[in-house]
Image: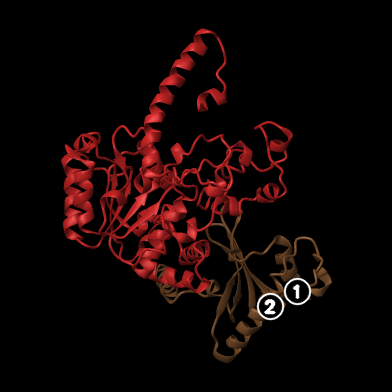
Amino acid sequence: MSLDAIPIHLIPPGEPGLTGNAPPLLHELLEMVNRLLASGETAAIDLSALPLTPADLDWLRERLGEGEIAVTLLANGESTLAETGCPGIWWVTHHNEQGVVTSQFLEVAFVPELVKAHPDDVALGRDHLESMMADL
Amino acid sequence: MQGPLIDTLARRGVTRRTFLKYCATLASMMALPPSVGRAMAEAMAAAKRPSVIWLPFQECTGCTESITRSHSPTIEGMIFDMVSLDYQETLMAAAGHQAEEARHAAMKENHGKYLLIVDGSIPLGIDGAYSCIGGRSNLDILKEAAEGAAAIVAMGSCASFGGIPKANPNPTGAVSVSDIVKDKPIVNIPGCPPIPVVMTGVLAHYLTFGSLPELDAQGRPKAFFGETIHDRCYRRPFYDQGKFAKTFDDEGARQGWCLFELGCKGPVTHNACATVKWNGGTSWPVESGHGCIGCSEPDFWDGGGFYKALSVPADPLKIGAAAAVAGAAAGVAVSFANRAKKKAAKAAHETTTLDDLEK
């Protein structure tokens, strides 16, 4: 029996470094965005937990594009929370103090969790404001 | 210090966002879903610090060094903010009877709830006389402390598997924690030394879920010990292509080829060095040009020589009990033979090669 009888066709490897693991993530993102619109439920994909090559990440970044807003967080190294070309999808990158990427997420939310101020911290801010005004 | 952790952190200048970011990364490293990062942060921020008793036995203090001198002190050092470290001989100010009293007070007050960390193996020879603290044997102290512990963390290869003290011919009769304590949950964090973030991860899991993380057959957290060094090694493609460094200074070594033939134990060693790295993500042994010595596996010291290539697919690190006893006797004979040979070589001004030492 010749190999031609077996209905399997080899797909030649595409662009170098691409594993084909990135496109399915777009479907997952679509589902997450639908849920965000329907119920306000937020979600995230841990990019460092998936077998993605740098080329895969570039492919994904290129497809999602750049949005209007990017937030820089300076806390134990720099973090960037950048909106992609699809509003509601944020590309979150955490660096450590040495500048090494420690983790990377795609977060689906109206505003990423880290950007919001915690009520306890707001209360501390109010106390500070009050004591500052008392000293005037 | 009392009160929730987040207040303690705030006093040290660690903001809530820094903590959230850290928890997100920690959850990612432990292969937990992103939502767990936030749950961890919330649980840990509100957690009352659990009492921790840290007992050092037959050890070199390398495990303590690894944790306390890790490169990002504000975060990994948080282990000491997350817990109420009630007894740690190397770090505590108290000494002598005061130190022993502090331990007893903490054990009584938190009976059934404290976390027990052990580093070092426990010698059983001559009724445990090889290692005593305050006139009591390690075995005695461990049994007493384990009785009231909620869970035990065996820190480093010595506490996990017996480590170097247990290496042939094991003169002190050293054993691991799990050889003695049978009725408590035990998590092994082997490594010589262990990776600091594994310790933090286990603590975070314990504080968030009130339980130890999922463990493998050797009692190690699967999140960090689930894969071999070889599986995650950046030099793996060279192994697949059959490109090996033959010596430490040949063209292959310069090209960064696979160190398998130079004795790398990566294929049989489960640890997270290849992904987490060391010294704040700076590098790790294979990246620095030396093969993995397999320090997080049982009996790694008796694995047959750090510079001898593994024979595939055999697993030389798994030695049967009978073979180990025979090996111990053979080990003594070989070491005497080598000593004699070294002496002879010195007298004759011959150079001793690596092969001679490993015969």
Residue B329 can be seen in this image: yes
Left or right position of B117 against B106? right
SS label for mark 2: helix
Question: Image quadrant of residue A6?
Answer: bottom right
Q: Mark 2 and 1 residues: CB-CB less than 8 Å, in contact? A: yes
Residue A40: percent from the left, percent from the top?
55, 87
Quadrant of image for the N terminus of chain B: bottom left
Left or right position of A106 against B186? right
Instruction: Please tell me whether mark 2 or mark 1 is closer to you in this view.
Output: 2
**Circle number at residue A49:** none
Left or right position of A39 against B247? left
Which residue occupies 21% across, 62% down? B112
Which residue lies under the disc numbered 1? A63
Is disc 2 surrounded by few (<14), some (14 to 19) or many (20+) residues within 10 Å?
A: few
Which of disc 1 and disc 2 is earlier in sequence?
A: 2
Residue B60: percent from the left, percent from the top?
36, 37
What amino acid type should be assigned to the residue bearing mark 1? Arg
Q: Colour of chain A?
A: brown
Q: Nearer the viewer, residue B340 or B61?
A: B340
Q: Residue furthest front?
A: A1
Instruction: Read off the chain for label 1.
Output: A
The Cα atoms of the two marked residues, 2 and 1, are separated by 9 Å
Which residue lies under the disc numbered 2? A26
Residue B97 vertical placement versus B7 (above, below):
above
